[in-house]
Image (cartoon, rainbow, N blue to C red):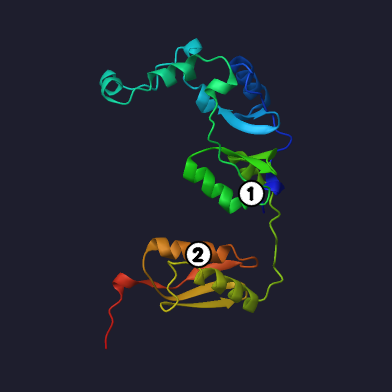
Amino acid sequence: MRARDIMSNPVVTVGPHTSVRDIAGLLFKHRISAVPVVDEGRLVGIVSEGDLLHRYEIGTADAGRGSWWRRILGPDDSVASYVKSHAARARYVMTEDVVTVSPDTTLARIAQLLEQHRIKRVPVLEDGKLVGIVSRSDLVRALAAREWVEADGLDDDAIYEQLSEELEQQPWWRSLMTNVVVSDGVVHYYGAFDSEAHKEAARVAAENVPGVRGVEDHRLPMATLSWSV
């Protein structure tokens, strides 16, 4: 799946001169955590709940400035902090460096960007125009709405092939230590495993293969095995 398949559209947007009060009202009304700032059709920034966290109106302007000695010895960000907490328009409080994606960006890449940049959403741009937005909640909704395919008709050979392909792609899998057997839809593991975490991962891999009715792991921990020549 890609961004175009799950993005929210149309997107609630504001202009650079939209008041902070109106922005707060939009976030509350639409139950969203951020609004893109658009100027003549061009994305110029985004205002999120985080941008409105420290505001003089509610007495939180100094909440994020830290101790007095850090303010004295650290970099002088007092001017920027004052503007951020007192400015009345979007242009002064918005985050300008916005991470964006295209409609064809994969969900895997989007999840990576959200985690890497510690953000909650990414605007979707096509030919420079804002066409949607993908948030963490959109990813969760996509998971909830996914059509889980029941594949009881798969035979044991097909299950074995699909499971083997998945396992061989994983860096933790030790094919020389484990023998995989599929019988009547039940996956059996024989041999040895490195740790309980590896054992659990192998079970998860098997359970995700359509048609698997059960998993039985007969392997022994490597630490308990004694090898003789």
Q: Position of residue 210 (x, y in %)?
A: 64, 65
> Hey, which residue is sitting farthest right in the picture?
10
4 in relation to 15, above or below: below
| Visible residue check, residue 193 | yes
Give the residue type at disc 2. Answer: Arg
Q: Position of residue 217 (x, y in %)?
A: 47, 70
Q: Quadrant of the C terminus?
A: bottom left
Marks 2 and 1, the one that precedes in the sequence: 1
Secondary-structure class at tag 2:
helix
> Hey, which residue is sitting farthest bottom in the picture?
229
Q: Quadrant of residue 130?
A: top right
Q: Which mark is residue 203?
A: 2
Disc 1 target residue: 143
199 in relation to 87, above or below: below
Q: Position of residue 84 (x, y in %)?
A: 48, 20
Query: How far is mark 2 from mark 1, CA to CA?
Result: 21 Å
